[in-house]
Amino acid sequence: MIDREHDLPLMRQAEVLRLSRSSLYYQPRPVSAADLAIMRRIDELHLDFPFAGSRMLRDFLRAEGVEIGRCRVITMMRRMGIEALYRRPNTSKPAPGHKIHPYLLRGLAVGRPNQVWAMDITYIPMARGFVYLAAVVDWHSRRVLSWRLSITMTVDFCLEAVEEALAKYGKPEIFNTDQGSQFTSSDFTSLLMANGIAISMDGKGSWRDNVFVERLWRSVKYEEVYLRAYGSVAEARASLGRYFDFYNRKRPHSSLGAQTPDQTYFDNLPQAVAA
């Protein structure tokens, strides 16, 4: 897709193709077909049993006939960017220069669009590899405001998604994420603070704090990703684009009174913003 001999600058090519800038320079290391199959199964098990840690996942896999040790499971989970989700004391310390912000949504009544946005990253398996998907979601309407794919879990593709959402839909009062290094980085938090947005971060390992995004990932994977075998990043991007269009415009949500995210988002915007 990227033509290094073209007159168009590489950065502009990446922008047009909606590619993460890091993908221009990253040289991927191949992952064996056997490991990819196990990683996909771990992803499925993680969706069904989000509380399962490396020991339990190892035991699930062994029960299915996969000979695997806990250390290998841990390595794969780290590569996929997943961990067991449960409430626990937060004894971890942020990376140098990375500040952890408090969770601001506990007890908050979220009753309108653009009051709270949330963002997360998830692992997307393909036929011969994998990518990472980041999405910005309006908490009230469940609408996917923007999204990006990347072959690496660096902060730049998250920044691009946030910048697009801000350009198209204004800004939220609160922006909620987990404590991933992408979201605690100064580049990411500075973007939010520069726009006067309050920063909220989940308790480490607590799925309840960002439950609406977790539910989105479940829908995306069971209704789209697991039904496909993407042959390339371009194919994954095109197919996910069609799914998110369906999700926003046509898919009714029981929690929204059978309305679509688009209906709930646009019908409840202030008149000036909606126009």
Image: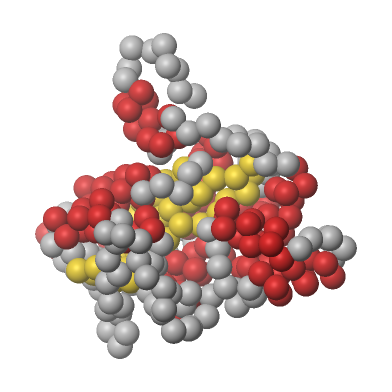
Q: Give me the residue at 27% from left, 59% from top.
A: 97
**In this picture, is 127 found above or below 225?**
above
x and y percentages locating residue 123 in the rendered image: 55, 54
**What is the total number of numbered labels drawn onto the structure image?**
0
Residue at the limit of the structure toward the front, as seen here? 96
Q: Give me the residue at 70% from left, 73% from top.
A: 55
x and y percentages locating residue 216 in the rendered image: 49, 64
x and y percentages locating residue 35 in the rendered image: 73, 49
x and y percentages locating residue 171 in the rendered image: 20, 59
Q: Give me the residue at 28% from left, 76% from top.
A: 102
Image-quadrant location for residue 268: bottom left
Residue 111 appears in the rendering: no
Please state if 225 lies on the left or on the right of 242 as rendered.
right
Q: Give me the residue at 75% from left, 42% from top.
A: 33
**In this picture, is 102 found above or below 35?**
below
Please state if 162 lies on the left or on the right of 197 as rendered.
right
Q: Quadrant of the C terminus?
A: bottom left
12 or 225, which lies in front?
12
